[in-house]
Amino acid sequence: MIKRLMTFLMLLLPAGCTGIPEGLTVVEDFSLDRYLGTWYEIARIENSFEKNFEEVSATYSLKENGTVRVLNSGFDTEKNRWKRVEGKAKFVGESDRGALKVSFFGPFYAGYNILALDRDNYSWAIVSGHKRSLFWILAKTPEIEPSLLAELTAKAGTMGFETDTLHYVRQSAGEDERNKARQGD
């Protein structure tokens, strides 16, 4: 039993879970203050922890201890209910680089790498985990112009992401429903 548990824990802690995919760099001159707030998932490469989720958003706020509170919410279409999970994020290295690590489960962290960002308004971001199969296009609004989405998708393709596998997240709930989800109602 102990041997199985240790093997399981080793699988959960792969080396480099907080790194940046090979050949990519994070944004420099990053401003956390401008990044805080609610971001909506516009598109993602499907992953096991968001399977069957639509209307996904993440709200980032600064905690007194300097870490970032992360509140993710989304609608589980299979179970027909809203779900939310709270976590924390910290910078990996300097706070003016878009390299963070996020944890939703105790001491286990995963990479949160901001690879591209609307520098003028902080209205959209391209984000990845430690590998290219963890990928998101995020925006400060639930929807973005189709031409901008096409531009960001093409940009992601040049970074080596498999954009033909993108899942475009449905964001059709009203703001009242999103607020309830974020507050846990």
Image: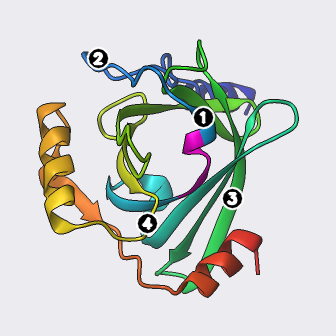
- Mark 2 surroundings within 10 Å by alpha-carbon count, few (fewer than 14), some (14 through 19), many (20 or more): few
Q: Nearer the viewer, mark 3 or mark 4?
A: 4
Residue found at the far front of this picture: 120
Which residue is denoted by mark 4 in the rendering? 141
Q: Nearer the viewer, mark 2 or mark 4?
A: 4
Q: Position of residue 121 (x, y in %)?
A: 42, 47
CB under 8 Å between discs 3 and 4: no
Q: Which type of secondary structure does the marked residue at label 2 adopt?
A: loop
Distance between mark 1 and mark 4 Cα atoms? 18 Å
Considering the image in quadrants, where does the N terminus appear? top right
Q: Which amino acid, mark 4?
A: Thr
CB under 8 Å between discs 2 and 1: no
Q: Which amino acid, mark 1?
A: Leu
Which residue is denoted by mark 3 in the rendering? 85
Image position of 98 with respect to 121: above or below: above
Residue 134 seen anywhere in this rendered image of the structure:
no
Distance between mark 2 and mark 1 Cα atoms? 24 Å
Q: Which type of secondary structure does the marked residue at label 1 adopt?
A: helix
Which residue is denoted by mark 2 in the rendering? 22
Distance between mark 3 and mark 2 Cα atoms? 29 Å
Q: Nearer the viewer, mark 2 or mark 1?
A: 1
Which residue is denoted by mark 1 in the rendering? 32
Q: Which type of secondary structure does the marked residue at label 3 adopt?
A: strand
In the image, 61 versus 77, the foreground residue is 61
Q: Nearer the viewer, mark 3 or mark 1?
A: 1
The span picked out in magenta is: 34-38
Please name the colour scheme applied to the rendered image.
rainbow
Q: Position of residue 38 (x, y in %)?
A: 57, 59
Q: Which amino acid, mark 2?
A: Glu
Image position of 139 with respect to 170: above or below: above
Q: What residue is rendered at 46% in x and 19% in y?
A: 19
- Mark 1 surroundings within 10 Å by alpha-carbon count, few (fewer than 14), some (14 through 19), many (20 or more): some
